[in-house]
Image: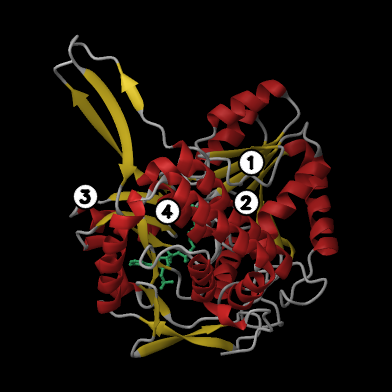
Amino acid sequence: MMNLQLNDPSLLIDRILVNGDWQNTSNTFAVDNPATEKVIAHVASAGAQEPEAAVAAAAEALLGWKQRTAKERANLMRRWFELMMENQEDLSRILTAEQGKVLAEARGEIAYGASYIEWFAEEAKRVYGDTIPEPAKDRRIVVIKQPVGVVACITPWNFPNAMLTRKIAPALAAGCTVVCKPASATPLSAFALAKLSQQAGIPKGVINMVTGPSSKIGPVLTSHPAIRKVTFTGSTKVGKSLVAQCATTMKKTSMELGGNAPFIVFEDANLDAAIDGLMFSKYRNSGQTCVCVNRVLVQDGIYQVFVEKLVAAVTARLKLGNGTEKNVTMGPLISEKAAVGVDRLVQDSVAQGARIAIGGRRSNLGSCFYEPTVLVDVDNDMPVAREEVFGPIAPIIRFRAEEEAIRIANDTQVGLASYFYTRDIGRVWRVSEGLEYGIVGINEGAISNEMAPFGGVKESGSGREGSKYGILDYLEIKSLCMGGI
Ligand code: NAP
């Protein structure tokens, strides 16, 4: 394994976690650093047998975990949160090495990921039931909420830490146990997180982690009768296939899928604030977040000046490079394949009439790097507007009227995050209500934290993570009807 100069080198783990044991397997796969293209570790690759064992361990551990009081679970989770923050620097180094985002962003992700554990440790104690009036005089109805059971968590590579904690934290708080399958590109952050859960005293079998080919692990998780829920963050295509697989055993599902976020700038907006919001929401994580701006809609009268300001900001504020280097503000994409795909979207759109204002090509820093890009003269039918870009490309579309902006914004099959900038209070309400999205940023580019519900509509999925609503996805409602009173 590569030396990542960690304060606690034992956090760098290359084995899977089943029933509290870190296990080797007969096969391994390489995890590399997208900035340097060097191998960090060869990680254990599970077949079908290890996920079966992990599910059995989670089912066994469920019996004890769900019977603990909410306060006991909360105290263990609180300790886990503290350990994450105490080890923030090591967790960030592992994250940057395998994922590529700059170290400052990795630190932010660890704090963000930890905040879900802190929040749901608190929410564990607030799983309230109801008493309901009964039509008959001698009966009463009481509603209790219980954990759904063993949960499978399948997560992507773009937030290797936070996408896991957003699932594991509400699951554990509710009294569920989990089998996690982190993305193959970024398993090391997941293992380090699990190691800290052991140090916090979370019992064996409550959290299991298996890595390897999704073709072997996926079918076990979607068909095993002991798994009662599958929670997934990833692409819409894979999400649809998982929901179909889960239908055969009627598992509950939560799906956090892809987006195509519009960012609308009206003529009355504070343009400098809009530029700041766009720079954050477009280029962080090199454009690889599900809530990243995908289309920038700018009103006619300010189009030219806005483009000039954006190009100036990209030139002044973004420095591409290895995320561990000082002054670097944007890292590589996750893989060479991703860089090739982003370039294809750009070149296909240019062939259809878009113009490159800045960037528009792969960088010579390495095969995974793509230059921050602004495209102008884009229309909503071009590939860069139709597809989820997942790269540092800002395609600018011109509009004239408010209704036209809402129509263009909603002209997509997905609906996760959206943003708009205006200082007109009437417009704030009209546009907020008109946008078919689960999340709306109003004069704000940073829209996610543990206290706000996160999730999409249309083909962006179902369920909500974070907030007081997040734990409901991991609870069953049981109605108790008492007679003879
Ligand atoms: P992905 O290809 O769908 O993969 C996500 C996870 O699913 C990975 O662990 C992957 O494993 C696994 N997987 C792939 N095919 C599978 C199958 N047939 N059965 C079971 N598991 C399977 O997505 P990605 O490229 O990693 O992530 C990017 C996508 O995630 C984007 O669309 C983005 O918008 C979305 N996303 C959504 C949110 C949200 O909250 N809505 C947040 C972040 C990202 P392998 O790695 O082994 O292939």
Residue beneath disc 4? 172
Residue beneath disc 2? 293
Residue shown at the point (63%, 44%) measured from the top left? 447
Q: How many marks?
A: 4
Where does the image place residue 5, in percent across and percent down from the top left?
Answer: 69, 84
Residue beneath disc 3? 250
Can the viewer see residue 21? yes
Where does the image place residue 154, in percent across and percent down from the top left?
Answer: 40, 63
Q: Earlier in the sequence, mark 3 or mark 2?
A: 3
| Mark pair 1, 4: CA separation | 33 Å
Labels 1 & 2 near each other (Cβ < 8 A): yes
Here the colouring is secondary structure
Q: Earlier in the sequence, mark 3 or mark 4?
A: 4
Residue shown at the point (35%, 43%) measured from the top left? 475
Q: Residue flagged by tag 1: what amino acid is it?
A: Tyr
The answer to whether the beta carbon of the residue marked 3 is less than 8 Å from any atom of ligand 1 is no
Q: Residue flagged by tag 4: what amino acid is it?
A: Leu
Q: Earlier in the sequence, mark 1 or mark 2?
A: 2
The answer to whether the beta carbon of the residue marked 2 is less than 8 Å from any atom of ligand 1 is no
Quadrant holding the N terminus: bottom right
